[in-house]
Amino acid sequence: MTDLGPSGQTETLLSDYRAPAWRIVHAELVFELDAEATQVLARLHLQADPAQPGAALVLDGEDLELLSIALDGQPLDASRYRHDAHHLRIDAAPATCVLETRCRIHPARNTRLEGLYRSGESLLTQCEAQGFRRIAYFIDRPDVMPTWRITLRGDKARYPVLLANGNPLAQAYLADGRHEAVWENPHPTPCYLFALVAGRLQCVRKDVRTADGCAVALQVWAAPHDVGRCAYALGAVERALRWDEQRFGRCYDLSVFNVVAAQDFTMGAMENKGLNIFNARYILADEATATDADYQGIESVIGHEYFHNWSGNRVTLRDWFQLALKEGLTVFRDQEFVADLQSRQVKRIEDVRLLRARQFAEDAGALAHPVRPDRYREINNFYTLTVYEKGAEIVRMLHTLLGEATFRAGMDQYFSEHDGHAATLEDFLAAHAAASGRDLSQFARWYAQVGTPELDIADDFVDGRYTLRIAQRQRDANAAPLLIPLRFALYDEHGAPIHATPTASDAAVREGVIELTAPAHTLVFAGLSARPLPSFNQSLSAPVKLHYDYAPAQLARLARCERDGLGRWDMLQRLATGVLLRQFDAHAEALGALSATLGDLLDDAHADPAFVAECMALPDFDTLADAQARVDIAGLLAARKALLLDLARKHETRLRQRHAALATRAAGGLDGAAMGARRLRNACLSWLTELYPEARLASAQFDAATRMTDRLAALRCLVHADAPAAARAQEAFAQRHEHDPLSTDKWLAVVATRPHADAVEAVRALLDSRWWTPTNPNRVRAILGSFSRMNPTAFHRANGAGYALLIEQLPLLDRINPQVAARLLAGFESWRRWDGGHDALAREHLERLHGKLASRDANDLLGRLLAARAA
């Protein structure tokens, strides 16, 4: 650590990486479990690195009460070691030795939800990124990978189920009503993947055989009153296991795969080896309490965590700077999993919508950073959309460049060469370079660049020669050019594809993909009878912003004829954005083209209803804000509402017809057709409610609904429209689901996102009510996260009341759970671009936090927010 950042905190630098001076070959842990005071005996088998002779043995530890310490079986005299609030240091330890420490920790006091903590009546852990040091003294870094033997002991009545990493070895009854379970993880595994769970749990189970013939018990655990809602999650685990066998040739490697649902969990889920711990919202589901989106989220997150067994666990990270190596790669894998099981075009649209709305904004704001940063002050703050979503897009570009077969060969080589080891992004690219025979050194620049690259495209057509001129630029004007795969197509005046290859080009063109490698390229297509209509960046082949001067009529034509589903949706998004931001000289023509194209989609009974619903969704506030150098908050909100009202008025008849016609299909179960019908039906309901705020149709749907998807959609329409039936429906919903925290979160989020300025007062009322539980991350996200991220009308209230509400809560939340507080603070990432005095109000409220935040997490973000200059 050699540098200080703007918040005054010491920075860790990538360039300072050194191999560990000591390695833990094997770890034996014994837990005497109790919520108030747990004792942890850690016996570590250590080896010194012969290349670093004489290095002290330094272990990490925080909030630990050291009870005893011994080296090679002998108690260690106090003169032989030193320890403080962060480390335990032993000088002159033998090169091969066994260190034994006994510590006391206090799970019930642990509101940070890092290390071992209590959730309800259960004890469980969260160790990524640096939580294990709150359990025992350890070399807490991902390139230290011991094998493990874990013994759990506890009161049998209080903790009848004892789970840990690996395979179960033994169980035994002890004196005084206690029992123990012994687990063994034979795979070298870093401590951030350690896990235990103890509590009154029940499971659903399925026994399967892997493709290589091994028996595996798949088990999904929850509290007894919740276990009935685990069946879908169990099916998702098996689907993920089979998909990874078929698509990537990866088989599971233990005799059990355990998944546990936790109501108190900071993240979405955690891929601990053999014992995945999940936020309950990504496990518990039935049609009375979970929406279609919840089911899809369960499929995706279970896939993500299961796939980590190879991309993250069997091959892990050398250091935390390589975070995208496991997260970006595994997001790509879970995206492909869902796309293969469901609608590929709809899944791609959902992923791109998130990327553009949130990751592009992150790239343009005060918290922008490379996919692999070169420094950090608090690693928890780099679990970002840039690492996850942009990281996945980089892997997708590699897949596009290499093709499926070669990409799979590169993955096989990567897994084979680095199984059981800690790897780097260079290792990942080297495997693909070897498998493909390609030099990927220029491609590697994607991991180091900051901001969203932009492409400027111009064309002309003269005497049958169509010329394209493509230039790339980056946030850093001096940055070296990137390798950008740009998928494109040309269409004739009838909407048919033109199968033409360039007759002259200074860029490689392979199977409809232009490989951009220089600051500018020129391509010429000769022998064309008429000027073609081009489509660029199909399927979002690269995470870039594209600038091409489309006329409204051209966008409307492409929205009809484009063969790429994402491309059709994208053209409608571009058309709507141009209308909302008045980017077209012919505004009326653009509005007419948008309306007509949407009308055609609503009339098309053969179109996938889920796709039509995605096309109806106008660009959200964040996407529109990203398109403005200075964000006119009030203007954007007013323009979007006016356009939505205008389109709903023009298509009222169509909307009513589709809402009614889809009723039978929407009454189906969890198949894609029924889910798609419900999605479009509820999109129509939302538009009709804009026209008729009394919302009789929504009220009728709420009363008749038999599943959560339709009931919640109707409630949202009623509450957001201030409909006469809103209060009655809200109370009925709250009473129906009073004892289910996840369903309660749903109606609280509806209240927090009500698009009216006085929602500030409604949220304050929630914070003063019995519904407010600041120690539960899901509840904090449902109220404050939804308010600050999904209610721009209230959050950006002209007098700053929305900013004040959030800022006032952060010091308390920071003392409870720093990661949750820091993520809320990130909602100010674009504040310097806010217009209308909002920037000054944001600065004023952010500056009020100086000296009031206790954690590294929140202070790091506050320092970056106030130090950064406008992008």
Image (spheres, helix red, strand yellow):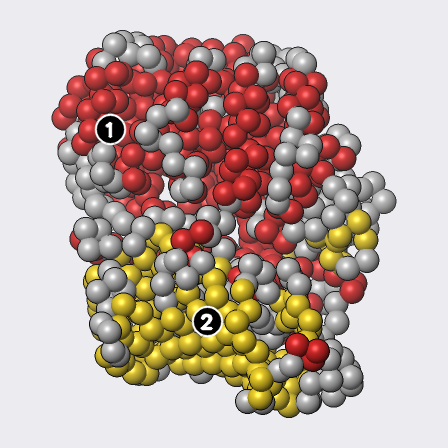
Q: Is residue 109 above or below residue 127?
A: above
Residue nearer the viewer, 396 or 831: 831
Q: Residue at x 62, y 42 (%)?
A: 854
The residue under label 2 is 40
Describe residue 27's horizontal placement relative to residue 246 as left or right: right
Q: Residue at x 34, y 14 (%)?
A: 721
Location of the N terminus by quadrant is bottom right
Describe residue 193's horizontal placement relative to residue 825 as left or right: left
Tell me the distance, in whole angstroms, between the alpha carbons under discs 2 and 1.
42 Å
Badge 2 vs badge 1, beta-carbon distance below 8 Å:
no
Determine which quarter of the picture holds residue 685: top left
Residue nearer the viewer, 75 or 806: 75
Identify the mark at residue 496; answer none if there is no mark: none
Secondary structure beneath dot 2 equals: strand
Q: Given the image, on which type of amino acid does mark 2 rest?
A: Val
Q: Is residue 300 above or below residue 103?
A: above
Instruction: Locate residue 85, reporting x and y percent.
Output: 64, 60
* Outermost residue toward the front in this view: 78
Location of the C terminus by quadrant is top right
Determine which quarter of the picture holds residue 213: bottom left
Identify the mark at residue 734; answer none if there is no mark: 1
Q: Given the image, on which type of amino acid does mark 1 rest?
A: Ala
Q: Residue at x 81, y 58 (%)?
A: 2
* Res 91 seen here: yes
Instruction: Locate residue 344, reporting x and y percent.
Output: 40, 49
Instruction: Locate residue 679, reporting x and y percent.
Output: 31, 33
Q: Is residue 216 above or below residue 108?
A: below
Circle 1 packing at 10 Å, graded few (<14), some (14-19), many (20+), is some
Q: Residue at x 42, y 45 (%)?
A: 347
Instruction: Locate residue 463, reporting x and y percent.
Output: 73, 34
